[in-house]
Image: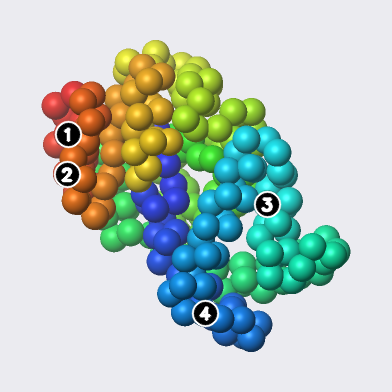
Amino acid sequence: MLWDVDDTLFDHTGADRKAFHLHFTAEGLPSDDAALATWRELTEAAYARFTAGELTFPGQRRERARAYLGPETTDDEADAWFTRYIAHFEASWTAFPDAAPALAELPYRHAVLSNSVNTVQERKLTHLGLRHHFELLLCSDDVGHSKPDPRAFHAACKALDLPPEQVAYIGDRLDLDALGAHAAGLHGIWLDRTGDTDAPPGIHRITTLATLPKLLAEL
């Protein structure tokens, strides 16, 4: 069983929202809903460049900081600004309430495949009390490929010593997670917590991890 982390096990969106309001208010920047939407657009664009190999992980953070501090901002200044945001972000880390019960109930081997860096996800899962459930933690920085590239999924299957057809992948993103896994020959499971969108053919859709054990038993 392969897992995504952010917005699957960990409430990334909620933690980011809290951290944004605290950080931007402290920095004297607008922190209303429109400002939050802009922040998330900048985040999505910079992170896409990271997963494409155009920016390093620290580089995508500096890119986001410079959007507010100006292009002439030094790396040290950008790092300091982003470190202040991270302090609020990490203080807001929480797991979804259905994460630990689902992991404890499922009688399968578990591993993580994340479009992040290993040190960040290792620290996060340890903080959330979930790290012990996973025998492997694979991130794009050590795999060398990012979801939805089939090579990322195949590298994870190889690490588990299992063929793709015997592995299920669960994540909150239809495009990166479920469709990517399905295209790579895995069972793609889409965790759609909003519950307002139908899944395309071949994709298994759930709205809570509480129903995951039943679905996996049927696969």
User: Which residue position is annotated with label 2?
Assistant: 211
Circle 3 residue: 60
Q: Which quadrant holds the C terminus?
A: top left
Q: Could you tell me which secondary element the residue under label 1 belongs to? A: helix
Secondary structure under tag 4 reads loop
Specify the label residue 111 is tagged with: none
Judge by depth and name the residue closer to the eye, 8 or 76: 76
Q: Which mark is residue 215?
A: 1
Q: Label 2 is placed on what type of residue? A: Thr
Q: Quadrant of the N terminus?
A: top left
Q: Identity of the amino acid at label 4?
A: Ser
Disc 4 crowd, CA 10 A, few/some/many (<14, 14-19, 20+): some
Q: Relative to 217, is 141 on the left or the right?
A: right
Q: CA distance from mark 4 to mark 2?
A: 36 Å
> Could you classify mark 1 by the number of other residues whose Cα lies within 10 Å: few (under 14), some (14-19), or many (20 or more)?
some
Tell me which colouring the rendered structure shows: rainbow
Discs 2/3, front: 3
Q: What whole-number distance in Å separates the C-alpha atoms at marks 1 and 3?
A: 37 Å
Can you say whether 82 is above or below 25 in the image?
above
Residue visible at 32% across and 18% down in the picture? 166
